[in-house]
Image (tube, rainbow, N blue to C red):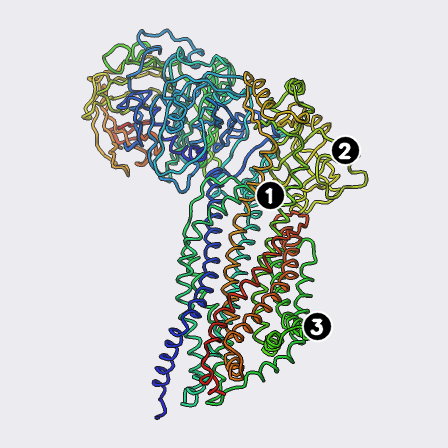
């Protein structure tokens, strides 16, 4: 029996993942009769569902952020993440895209968590780490994920000095503020990067309250570091490359974000060569149409911000790419914003995160629709 | 009469063969039976071995999955911080913590298994042989993760304990009683045959309940074998350097191989025994075929005169026996399949008690085994009949050979045969000399000794018959003298019959004496190593604070009716040879074990805490000698202990180390023990005392087992008997083959002498006298075979005890001579001989004198 269970643990594991989803989203299961999941791979959208909220803090009022403290963790919310993307280049012009995410998820509200016995393993959080490198010259995408419970210190986040880690992946402040060091070690690749801050944090939505659906509380606290000059090494296939470039950090924490009729999103983080940045996410409903809570932000060279609402922007899907499971992702977009007419083009098609929660996340080029010149680069995330 | 052509010759032969088989159907049946039983035994044992081996592998596979390495500590386990550092500093992904312990719920003893499901997920442990079916879960599975004192359990166990999801219940452990919650209940697929009572919990809950905060049993690692081997080696070296001194990185594969090798000796033993029965079957076939040729020699002679070629006759006899071999083998394989199903439980039972607790004991049908059995049977049949077939082919046309002459020809060979036999036995003996030889050589030598002895048989038979005639001719009646003379004159046939009977009986004697000696030794050893009357046992490791405390020992000593309290420790620890058993008890060395040998002053040095004693199997398997030292994992890391002595031990296939108390408490820093034996005041009632102790333990935390040593001895012997049940079954079957062999051999002898008896009848002997003569003769031959079987059997038992067993298990046994086995042997030989004589006697009585004589 022991043996059966131990060996069944891969099975248990799948169930835990399933339960992970159930507990967090209560999508369809009521904690009973959990059978082998026949569902297709879960989407990150499932993960941001909004059923169990009792006992958690919620994003209702616009926050009053204070830095560097708010770079650190925010206990009491159900999930929180540190999301880095960036475009890097060697001196000889070899290009790499990368993304690294630290996801933190509460198993239950703090009030329901009994760790009174003081056991070091008693845990209330599970962590998931994602990392990927897009080797643009060879059009090859490398992805990795790790899972762990938080305790005993297997993962975590601390405020002063800032540090977030999952096993041996970590991001930490060298001093009190930036620069930060990033260290990620996967089977196929590794990243050792240093990130500096060029601009102040950009508070998304209403002073950092990002409303995802009309119901109050269906929102997250959300800020971005839109331009982080980056240098360091990309290690790939036994080779080390000295690289430099720009990164983008998204920070978000919430208890429930998506409404039940929201099924995915397209998220753009664009860094233009003129020193401006644009973030825009387009939420989709079950039929694929744009949801009215889609939103964005334009940041000027000097850090001035303009909120973008759906009516300010025109998005046209131009080229589609089919993943092996049949999901269609848009790898070329036309974006019209203010007087600009841009083509947003994937650096290459297959930048699919082929992991437990499947999505497309990759480096993109921004091309001026009129002149045909490349005027910036960025990252695109598509959750279907 | 026209000369038959080639095809006519064939049809003639075929019809004749068919008619003969029908007329002598009993002989044919016996022949078939012999091969059948031989093949059956080989197939059954082979199937059982195959199944047991696969069960062994599967069980290891199940326990370990794709674990390649384990980080283990002394008996106090591994500090959990090592796990965290392993993941965060070294970035080792495929590592999982492991922790388990005994708990009691409603008087049921259960194992609580702590695990981290998230780590398990990254391990990707596989589970062979189990359906990939669903686990259906009721309750909040997730609640079990990382929360205090929550468990999940399997549905049937939950029902037995009267628990369901959401229930609170009380668990008893050494750290006290705990209230735990059933977070979820799951059901496994119906077809899954799983045993054992397991509560599953998150590591956090398991540590709380078992009172082992901060500790893990081990950290399991699964290095990717697909990775570059050099890279892996490099990583392992780094990991070894990184680990604290008191932790070990062990390779699971090496451990498993070690275990597998040890149990392999047992499988070889079984196979050898079954092959021995096949040898007896070969003798039987040789006899039967020879008989059939003799009986038909006139017919064959006539055929030859009619132009049937020698080659045709040779082919016919082979073909005949090929067909018989085929039929018998098919039947034998079928019977072997059924016997194998039965034997597999016995074989796995033995492996279970000797080596490893098997999780799966399925019967596995390996078609290759069946094919092997089939081919073996046919081949055996053909090979054993080749000589008689050649003899048949040599039958001269028409002229009938004179057989008495052949018998006397044979006489000249007797001394040469005997010399050859002595040479074979000498060679066998020489092969048996080295103390550390291979097991296969051991069996080969045994075969040489047996074969050599067979070659001595004609000389012995001749000598014994002649001696009887010299000594007894004055008081033997005429018929007695005639019986002996006739037996002596046909020495070629009689000695063959006696040899066959002798080998068969000696196998039963040899194995019987061996098992008897082993049992006797175990009883002797039990008396010595189980002092006292009552034992109190805990399943635990004292270093982690579980065990019988000094206070409890004092309280026990103060109870009425108790004369003395002895404490000891028995636990599994890590050593340079992997997991071994460690024993410690407070008694002086002399009273502690059956000592094989010690260094000078070994006993005094031991009592003074200078070193350890190791068990004989350990010394044998690891080739350790007095004065060597052994590395054991103590609280302070790997430590060398000098070996002061070797003691006899029969508890385990791996080996055991015994340590004086002073040494144990120094290196393990505890005074807790795992066992206590209580000596009762003479005449006090065991049941009363037991009740008293139970009352004392009733409100105490921890799970204790109370057994009376009398029961324990019984239990040990039961386990012993279970372990050797397979041997007894094989012995019984060997007797059966022997019996069939003897009946047919003696029948061959008597039938051949049909003409002789006819002459006797013609010269005035009554039918009753003729029958009596035959019976006397077979009885004498039976007695001779029985007597000869005794020295051979004892020789065989000596080889089995001192060579085969030592080479297989490293056990030395005391020699015990169970008279019953010897008596049974002789009796078996005589009864078989008498029974074998009945039919020829009956036939000789009814012989048509004129008809038989016409042949002269």
Instruction: Give B190 or B29, whichever is nearer the viewer.
Output: B29
- Separation (CA) of disc 1 from disc 2: 26 Å
Q: Is residue A83 above or below residue B290?
A: above
The residue furthest bottom is: B1
Q: Is residue B378 above or below residue B367?
A: below
**Residues at marks 1 and 3 touching, judged by CB atoms closer than 8 Å:** no
Residue A110 drawn at (x, y percent): 40, 12
According to the image, label 1 marks what residue? B653
Q: How many labels does the image show?
A: 3
Pair 3/2: label in front: 3
Instruction: For label 2, count other residues whose C-alpha is less than 10 Å away and answer few (under 14), some (14-19) or many (20+).
Output: some
Residue A140: mark = none
Same subunit, tags 1 and 3:
yes
**Secondary structure at numbered mark 1:** loop
Residue A321 drawn at (x, y percent): 25, 36
Mark 3 vs 2, N-terminal side: 3
Instruction: For label 1, count other residues whose C-alpha is less than 10 Å away and answer few (under 14), some (14-19) or many (20+).
Output: many
Instruction: Give B39 or B37, whichever is nearer the viewer.
Output: B37
Query: The residue marked by circle 1 belongs to what chain?
Result: B
Residue B471: mark = 3
**Secondary structure at numbered mark 2:** loop
Pair 1/2: label in front: 1
Instruction: For label 3, count other residues whose C-alpha is less than 10 Å away and answer few (under 14), some (14-19) or many (20+).
Output: few
Pair 1/3: label in front: 3
Residue A29 drawn at (x, y percent): 28, 23
According to the image, label 2 marks what residue? B610
Residue B744 seen in render: yes
């Amino acid at each position: 029996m022991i043996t059966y269970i131990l060996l069944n643990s891969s099975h248990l594991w799948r169930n835990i993942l399933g339960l992970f989803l159930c507990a967090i989203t209560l999508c369809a299961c009521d904690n009973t009769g959990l059978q082998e999941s026949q569902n297709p791979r879960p989407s990150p959208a499932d993960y941001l569902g909004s059923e169990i909220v009792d006992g958690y803090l919620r994003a209702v009022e616009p926050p009053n952020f204070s830095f560097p403290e708010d770079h650190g963790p925010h206990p009491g919310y159900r999930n929180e993440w540190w999301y880095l993307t960036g475009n890097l280049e060697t001196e000889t012009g070899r290009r790499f895209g990368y993304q690294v995410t630290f996801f933190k998820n509460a198993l239950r509200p703090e009030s329901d968590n009994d760790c009174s016995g003081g056991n070091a393993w008693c845990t209330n959080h599970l962590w998931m780490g994602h990392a990927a490198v897009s080797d643009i010259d060879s059009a090859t995408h490398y992805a990795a994920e790790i899972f762990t419970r938080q305790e005993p210190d297997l993962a975590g986040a601390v405020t002063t000095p800032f540090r977030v880690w999952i096993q041996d992946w970590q991001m930490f402040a060298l001093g009190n503020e930036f620069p930060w060091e990033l260290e990620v070690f996967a089977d196929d690749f590794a990243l050792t990067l240093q990130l500096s801050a060029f601009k102040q944090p950009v508070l998304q939505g209403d002073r950092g309250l990002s409303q995802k659906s009309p119901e109050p509380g269906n929102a997250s606290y959300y800020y971005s570091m839109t331009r982080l000059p980056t240098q360091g090494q990309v290690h790939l296939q036994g080779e080390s490359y000295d690289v430099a470039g720009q990164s983008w950090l998204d920070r978000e924490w919430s208890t429930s974000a998506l409404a039940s009729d929201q099924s995915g999103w397209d998220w753009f983080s664009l860094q233009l060569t003129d020193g401006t940045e644009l973030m825009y996410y387009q939420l989709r409903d079950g039929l694929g149409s744009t949801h009215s809570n889609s939103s964005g932000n334009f940041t000027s060279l000097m850090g001035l911000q303009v909120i973008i609402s759906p009516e300010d922007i025109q998005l046209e899907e131009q080229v589609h790419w089919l993943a092996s499971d049949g999901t269609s992702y848009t790898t070329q977009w036309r974006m019209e914003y203010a007087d600009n007419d841009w083509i947003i083009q994937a650096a290459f098609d297959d930048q699919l995160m082929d992991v437990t929660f499947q999505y497309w996340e990759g480096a993109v080029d921004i091309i001026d629709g009129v002149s045909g010149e490349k005027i910036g680069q960025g990252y695109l995330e598509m959750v279907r | 009469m026209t000369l038959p052509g080639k095809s006519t010759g064939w049809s003639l032969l075929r019809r004749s063969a068919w008619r003969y088989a029908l007329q002598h159907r009993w002989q044919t049946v016996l022949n078939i039976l012999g091969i059948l039983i031989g093949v059956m035994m080989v197939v059954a044992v082979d199937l059982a071995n195959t199944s047991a081996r696969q069960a062994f592998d599967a069980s290891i596979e199940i326990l370990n999955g794709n674990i390649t390495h384990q980080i283990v500590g002394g008996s106090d386990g591994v500090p959990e911080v090592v796990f965290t550092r392993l993941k965060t500093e070294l970035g080792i992904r495929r590592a999982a913590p492991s922790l388990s312990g005994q708990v009691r719920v409603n008087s049921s003893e259960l194992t609580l298994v702590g695990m981290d499901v998230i780590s398990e997920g990254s391990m990707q442990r596989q589970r062979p042989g189990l359906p990939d079916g669903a686990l259906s879960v009721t309750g909040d599975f997730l609640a079990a993760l990382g929360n205090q004192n929550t468990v999940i359990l399997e549905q049937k166990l939950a029902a037995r304990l009267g628990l369901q999801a959401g229930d609170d219940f009380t668990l008893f452990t050494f750290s006290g009683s705990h209230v735990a919650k059933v977070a979820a209940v799951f059901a496994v697929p119906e077809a899954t045959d799983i045993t054992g009572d397991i509560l599953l919990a998150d590591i956090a809950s398991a540590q709380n309940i078992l009172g082992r905060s901060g500790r893990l049993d081990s950290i399991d690692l699964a290095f990717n074998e697909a990775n570059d081997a050099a890279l892996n080696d490099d990583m392992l070296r780094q990991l070894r350097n990184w680990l604290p001194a008191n932790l070990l990185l062990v390779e699971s594969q090496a451990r498993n191989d070690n275990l597998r090798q040890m149990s392999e000796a047992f499988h070889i033993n079984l196979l050898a025994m079954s092959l021995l029965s096949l040898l007896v079957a070969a003798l039987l076939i040789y006899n039967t075929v020879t008989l059939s040729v003799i009986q038909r020699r006139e017919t064959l002679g006539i055929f030859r005169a009619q132009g049937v070629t020698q080659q045709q006759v040779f082919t016919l006899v082979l073909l005949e026996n090929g067909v018989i071999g085929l039929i018998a083998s098919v039947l034998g394989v079928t019977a072997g399949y059924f016997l194998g199903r039965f034997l597999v439980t016995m074989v796995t039972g033995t492996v279970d008690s000797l080596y490893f607790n098997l999780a799966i004991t399925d019967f596995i049908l390996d078609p290759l085994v069946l094919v092997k059995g089939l081919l073996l049977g046919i081949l055996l049949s053909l090979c054993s009949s080749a000589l008689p077939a050649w003899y048949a082919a040599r039958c001269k046309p028409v002229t009938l050979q004179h057989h008495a002459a052949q018998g006397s020809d044979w006489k000249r060979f007797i001394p040469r045969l005997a010399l050859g036999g002595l040479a074979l036995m000498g060679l066998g003996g020489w092969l048996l000399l080295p103390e550390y030889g291979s097991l296969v050589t051991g069996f080969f030598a045994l075969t040489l000794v047996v074969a050599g002895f067979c070659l001595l048989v004609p000389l012995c038979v001749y000598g014994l018959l002649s001696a009887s005639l010299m000594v007894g001719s004055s008081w033997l009646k005429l018929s007695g003298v005639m019986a002996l003379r006739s037996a002596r004159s046909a020495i070629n046939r009689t000695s063959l019959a006696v040899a066959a009977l002798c080998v068969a009986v000696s196998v039963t004697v040899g194995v019987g004496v061996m098992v008897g000696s082993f049992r006797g030794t175990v009883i002797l050893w039990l008396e010595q190593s189980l002092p006292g009357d009552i034992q109190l046992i805990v399943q635990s490791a004292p270093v982690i604070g579980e065990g019988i405390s000094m206070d409890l020992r004092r309280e026990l000593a103060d109870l009425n009716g108790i004369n003395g309290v002895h404490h000891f420790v028995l636990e599994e620890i890590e050593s340079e040879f992997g997991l071994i058993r460690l024993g410690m008890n407070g008694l002086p060395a002399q009273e502690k074990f059956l000592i094989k040998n010690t260094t000078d002053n070994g006993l005094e040095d031991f009592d003074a805490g200078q070193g350890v004693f190791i068990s004989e199997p350990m010394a044998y398997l690891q080739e350790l000698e007095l004065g060597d030292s052994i590395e054991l994992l103590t609280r302070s890391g790997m430590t060398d202990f000098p070996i002061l002595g070797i003691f006899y031990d029969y508890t385990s296939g791996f080996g055991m180390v015994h340590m004086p108390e002073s040494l144990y408490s120094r290196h393990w820093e505890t005074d807790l023990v795992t066992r206590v034996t209580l000596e009762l005041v003479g005449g006090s009632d065991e049941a009363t005392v037991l009740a008293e102790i139970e009352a004392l333990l009733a409100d105490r935390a921890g799970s204790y087992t109370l057994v009376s040593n009398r029961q324990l001895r019984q239990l040990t012997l039961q386990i012993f008997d279970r372990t050797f049940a397979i041997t007894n079954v094989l012995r019984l079957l060997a007797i059966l083959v022997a019996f069939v062999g003897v009946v047919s051999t003696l029948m061959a002898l008597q039938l051949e002498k049909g003409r002789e008896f006819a002459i006797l009848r013609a010269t005035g002997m009554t039918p009753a006298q003729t029958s009596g003569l035959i019976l006397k003769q077979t009885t004498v031959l039976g007695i001779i075979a029985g007597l000869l079987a005794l020295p051979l059997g004892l020789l065989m038992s000596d080889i089995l005890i001192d060579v085969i067993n030592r080479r297989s298990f490293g056990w030395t046994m005391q020699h015990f001579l169970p008279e019953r086995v010897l008596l049974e042997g002789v009796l078996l030989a005589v009864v078989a001989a008498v029974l074998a004589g009945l039919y020829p006697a009956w036939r000789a009585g009814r012989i048509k004198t004129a008809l038989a004589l016409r042949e002269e």
